Amino acid sequence: MFKKIGFTNKWSVISFFLIILILMPSVFILIGFFNPISDTWLHIRRYLLKDYIYNSVILVFFTGLFSIIIGVSLAWFVNAYDFKYSNFFKWGLILPLAVPPYIGSYTYVGLLNYTGVIQTFLRNNFELVLNQSYFNIMSLSGAIFIYTIFLYPYVFLITHAFLQKQSASLVEVSKTLGKSPISIFFRIILPISRGAYVAGTTLVVLEVLNDYGVVKYFGISTFSTSIFQTWFSLGDINSAIRLSVYLMAFVIIVLFLEKLSRGGKQYSYSNTKIKPLKAKKLTGWKNWSMFIYAFTVISLGFIIPVLQLIYWSIISYGKILNMNIIQTVLNSIGVSLVGSFIILVAAVIIANTVRIKKNILTKNYARIAVLGYSIPGAVIAVGVMIFFLKMDNFIQLISGQNNMLLLSSSIFMLIFAYLIRFLAIGYNSVESGFNKIGTDFHEASRTLGNGITKTFFKVDLPMMKPALMSGFLLVSIEILKELPLTLILRPFNFNTLATRAFEYANDEMIHESAILSLILIFISVILVYSLTYIKKKGR
Amino acid sequence: MRFLNKGSILLIVILVFSFTTLIMGAEEEVNLYTNRHYDTDKLLLDKFEEKTNIKVNVLKGGSDELIEKIDREGEDTSADLLITADAGRLHRAKNKGLLQQIENDTLFNNVPENLRDTENYWFGLTVRGRVIVYSKDRVDPSELSTYGDLTDDKWENRILVRSSSNIYNQSLLASFIEIHGEEWATEWAAGVVDNMARKPQGNDRAQATAIASGVGDIAIMNTYYLGKMLNSSNPEEVKVAKQLEIFFPSQETTGTHINVSGIGLTKHAKNKENAIKLMEYLSSVEAQEMFAKANYEYPVNPNVEPSNLLSSWGEFKPQSINLSKLGEYNKKAYMIFNRVGWK
């Protein structure tokens, strides 16, 4: 019977149990959906739901749109043209990814408000007091700006990597046919890179839907703030679950519409012959305007916020008591390394099973593996907490030891939550790695009588190294910046850079949070840089 | 089997890493869930550890999240004590059956009756008022009187206040529901919405800054934020704070709204004795000075003088309601805000 559903080797057995494990918390959550409707829910539906939907849709639509415009145009420019510092921009434009949006939002508010550097300068030097609404970033459009400028790198990163490898021959053919650069961009580049930027935009959209810090600070009600509100302020977990099911439905509709719009005409284009595009050297005003465009983006997304944070760190340096910074840094690094490692291992096991055993069961593995990315952090937190407490009860039952929470008071709970939340990112990297190496070598090795496991370690793994490393780094950056799960699920005395920076900022001590934010950004920058280094070498 | 060796070594590394956080030894300890995160709190707890040799383990988080966590952990909870920055939240913890009563003379002496639970499930540690802050230039203090007066037409387009999702606003409105009834509270909230200078946004500090920049003239905010701004490391913020003055509303009538951050012993505390020792310590004269000063709040212990800054603001008459009511009417208050469109 086990053979029937594909339990023919270790890989599929382990995959099966991993998938079950990943599904458990969602199951505990979904049970809540079938509870009867409460008064609170009627209240939410009557007074609040419209706002949630409106705000979420506006945020997602415009952030997605602007991220595509900025991400794709820049990815094309750095590939097709050789302008001032364009080699630096190839990786420099990813840097905004190192700044968590909530830190970015605190920084921009502090920069722009009445006591911030800009207004203070104008006031004290020119006695200029401008209308405050010019500086007000705490609005829907402000939130769109924050999300776009710190999240567009997802679109840039993936589109850039795609264009680097795939566009050369098509572009050269079009050139010989006499097409203008603008027509090449709109008629060739945009259609062929569609898969790449849609993948990037999907990540942006899911980040926006899940973000809690920015919208909470700006006072905008979205699905993610309302889930926390309903669960905590109204104490109604069932209505909170109802809202998250709505949110997940929303995500699924977005993904479905995207697929539908592509219809039959899929311009997927890929070529195994990798040939880099020859960049055209620019001179004069064209050279300068490209440089200014790229420099403006990187300034807004990285240089300006970092300078502001450095300034705050300097003025608040003496005030910070008892920071224990080293321990905090070690915690942050430790938890992201261990978390990423476990996520990558799980991703490899599942992806390898999917690749080798194609049946109804494994077909759905991939979908389940990426499911967690669309579930709001708060909901994962509850689900994981319930699941771990149930397991602890079970352990108590077997061991006969009462009053002990072995698992749910340990860091395993947090790492498991990361696994659910970020498996999608690890899985996508691993999957693209497997796609790239194909199955020829694998089958050759199997024909020679090697088992799946031996073949994996001897044949597949060495070829997969770049893909695994970049997956590892991407997940590490995410865990480093992660907030709601870490806040709720961490064990005693466990602080990370993200939680401490948030705590200070949340207590309206923005200057004090600056130094922790800076260290966090600095570590992320190292990871981002290693990421591009691997990509370069992998080429 | 190279795979097994490699794999198992990595696994061991991970397990060791994970368990180092688990193994904390069997020494004397007390586990504290708190949503205060001031650096001075840590110094205070260090002092307690030194004095008593009881190790204090701290888990920080939002008060709602911590309460939910204690609730989910049930009988096995690792929390001995819960500190939250709002009486309403302590009341919720009590209502959920997460706290236990304490009969302790030291605590009774250190914490006045109105600042603790009627049945002694929780005890206040620090006090803050939710007051009106006004522009020295544009507002004559004689214009100000009660909270109710804020709905008067003369304040049209002049009031600044943060969003209703904030617990301090919810507790303020809950106190009005207790004192004046639901209808009055609804009218009051609607009246304030009509007079707002802008849609609610930002935190309490942002409201104060908005007065200085001329967006509005008066703001509803907590006392300690002004203290924080006066001591800010940004000189511009200090300048802003100096243009502002505190007004304690409703002095002739029902009193100014106050709230506490307080502490409760969990129902299933495993280290009850140590926990009570810590409660006694935090309410003692020695600790109260630092504990309250850290956040520019008023100490609960009547034998401790408030800091110079707070004394300079003068004494005030607080609302006389029992603070448990803030929790009781929290949900009602939140729903009123939604109904009148206080974002």
Image: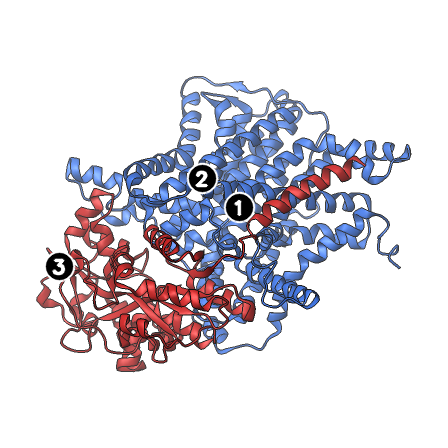
Chain colours: A blue, B red
Q: Amino acid at mark 1?
A: Val
SS category of the residue bearing label 1: helix
Q: Which mark is residue A281?
A: none
| Real-space Cα separation, disc 1 to disc 2, in angstroms | 32 Å
3D distance between C-alphas at marks 3 and 2: 40 Å
Asked whether A179 or B300 is in front, the reply is B300
Chain identity of mark 3: B
The answer to whether one can see residue A461 in this image is: yes
3 or 2: mark nearer the eye: 2
Q: Secondary structure at mark 3?
A: helix
- What residue is shown at x 60% (from left), y 70% (from top)? A33
Q: Is residue A42 above or below residue A322?
A: below
Q: Which residue is mark 2?
A: A326
For label 3, count other residues whose C-alpha is less than 10 Å away and answer few (under 14), some (14-19) or many (20+). Answer: few
Q: Chain of mark 1?
A: A
Percent from the top left, x then y, of residue B278? 38, 63
What residue is pinned by disc 3? Answer: B312
Label 2 residue SS: helix
